[in-house]
Amino acid sequence: MTNELEHLGRQVVRGGVSRRHFMGRAAALGLTASSAGTLLASVARAADPVTGGLIKAGMVGGESTNSLDPATFLSQVPFVFGQTWGEKIVEVGPTGALEPRIAEEWGASSDAKTWTFKIRDGVEFHNGKTVTAQDVFDTLDRHSNEKSESGALGIMRGIDTMQVNGKELVISLKEANADLPYLLADYHLIIQPGGGKDAPDAGISAGAYKVTVNEPGVRHGAEKFANFWDAGNRGFADQVEITVINDATARTAALQSGQVHMINNVEPKIVDLIKRVPGVTVKNTAGRGHYVFIMHCDTAPFDNNDLRMALKLAINREDMVDKILRGYGTVGNDFPINSAYPLFPADIEQRAYDPEEAAHYYKKSGHSGPIVLQTSDVAFPGAVDAAQLFQQHASAAGITIDVKREPGDGYWSEVWNKQPFCASYWGGRPVQDQMYSTAYISSADWNDTRFKRPEFDALITKAKAELDEAKRKSMYHDAALMVRNEGGLILPMFNDWIEAVSDRIGGWEEDGAQTMMNGYALSKTWLMG
């Protein structure tokens, strides 16, 4: 309730919503007129950015193997720190709409196969060099290289040719794609001088902050970039800092003691406890994020679809949402799309927990013996508890799951996308094409379920080229069914992003795209007195 009213209050201050509307909504939520007025005044006081100071975040999701090379970003800390110092061609705003950044405008040919991006004047890199269309070309070219191992390589493969024409970059696609600008908002595609080809991990871009400290797995720091082109809208603090605190208890203690101003991945089971901490507010936002158990479709015993189906039927999704998310999320249906996507196929039947049917498929698979499930505290909040709960659910179907707890450091480089059955999370993507192209088409480097179906690839290619929305939705419906019924994804729940923030932080906005305000928590907020 508070999050909704704070959001409305900010809209009142900015003129987007009337005071009458705000007071009416507050009354509907049970607030007295006096309380609503106090809240609105508080929001108004916090609405004007304050400059200066040091904003500190305590975050899970940092490892000693992390690099400043955007191509390698895997987990939360590199992602958020990258959004702090990096700048992209476009980005997806809190409402889900595209917002111009390095490109000030763009347009497509009538068949959506050729796109032209006009590069903004007056944008400077941290090293003093002016950002040019050639830098954008080189950046996309680097991430398109088959040897780059970029997390964006899967979506880059759709590009046929690129050409620099003065201040413009012209991109020709192999197949039409109405969503190309959304794909270019991918967080790996930070624009670097010369595309980062000479020094990909130099940490130089054109964002609000420039890197000063880089101690992977320990600490990252940055100072305000004096020549930042968009200084009126972000980059208010003099300095920002992320301390890697992978332990949930230590992270909470750091916030309570004032060591940090914000933490990510608050475990749902302690949300009520944190709500009682003076000077701290819990922020939870629904979005496209989801917690998963992933099986490699090309590795025994998971190369047997009957076994995969047995495990999908052996998990109680409602129990997961109740006990692991404590209600801060919704039930999943074994495909990575929910109602946050505009073309969500809502008519697909919800899969239910069915131990008897799971036992039938398990017997049919011919497999016997325990199945090893690898998990870790860093996989998602409550991942170890979730694995053990899954173990209990599956035992009712006669399926034995051995839960193997792995250390947090190295989990994303040694377990995820390498071991055949493990816990993980996805933050989701702005559109279906990007989600499927990043993780489910056969050529995707982040195809962490090894789902390789030529029919699926062809369907995604056809869908992104289809400009008739009804036909396109029908194609995504069929694609979702393929993943749900034949893939290696067990998706029991879509999670809210839950963070806890000091009341000294102003400017916090709901953004369901990713954790920590889609990674912009450090650059878009400010430190109040």
Image (cartoon, grey):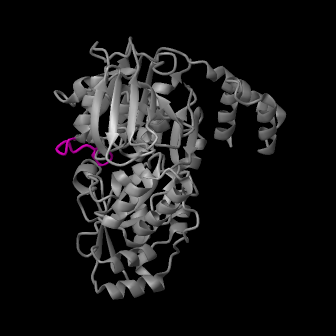
Judge whether 436 appears above or below 92 on screen. Answer: below
Q: Which residues are magenta?
A: 145-155
* Front residue (pair 170, 216): 170
User: In the depicted view, which residue is nearer to us: 111 or 236?
Assistant: 111
Q: Residue at x 31, y 18 (%)?
A: 125
Q: Nearer the viewer, residue 184 or 79?
A: 184
| In the image: residue 136, left or right of residue 29 | left
Task: Give percent across and percent down for residue 483.
Answer: 40, 66
* Residue at 30 percent of width and 42 percent of height: 159
Please count the marks in the image: 0
User: How far from the left and from the top, in percent, is residue 326?
Assistant: 56, 57
- Which quarter shows the C terminus? top right
Would you say residue 42 is visible in this rendering? yes
**Residue in the image at 83% along x and 33% along y:** 33
Determine the image quadrant of residue 59.
top left
In this image, 455 relative to 443: left or right? right
Q: Is residue 383 magenta?
A: no
Q: Quick one: quadrant of the N terminus? A: top right
Position of residue 319 measured from the top left corner of the image (x, y, whole percent)? 53, 68
Q: Main secondary structure of the magenta part?
A: loop
Residue 423: give x, y in percent of width and height.
35, 60
Identify which residue, 336 or 278, lies in the foreground: 336
- Is residue 261 visible in the rendered structure shown here? no
**Residue, x 39% and y 84% (percent of image)?**
361
Task: Give above or below for 418 relative to 499.
Answer: below
Relative horizontal placement of residue 26, taking residue 327 as reference (left or right):
right
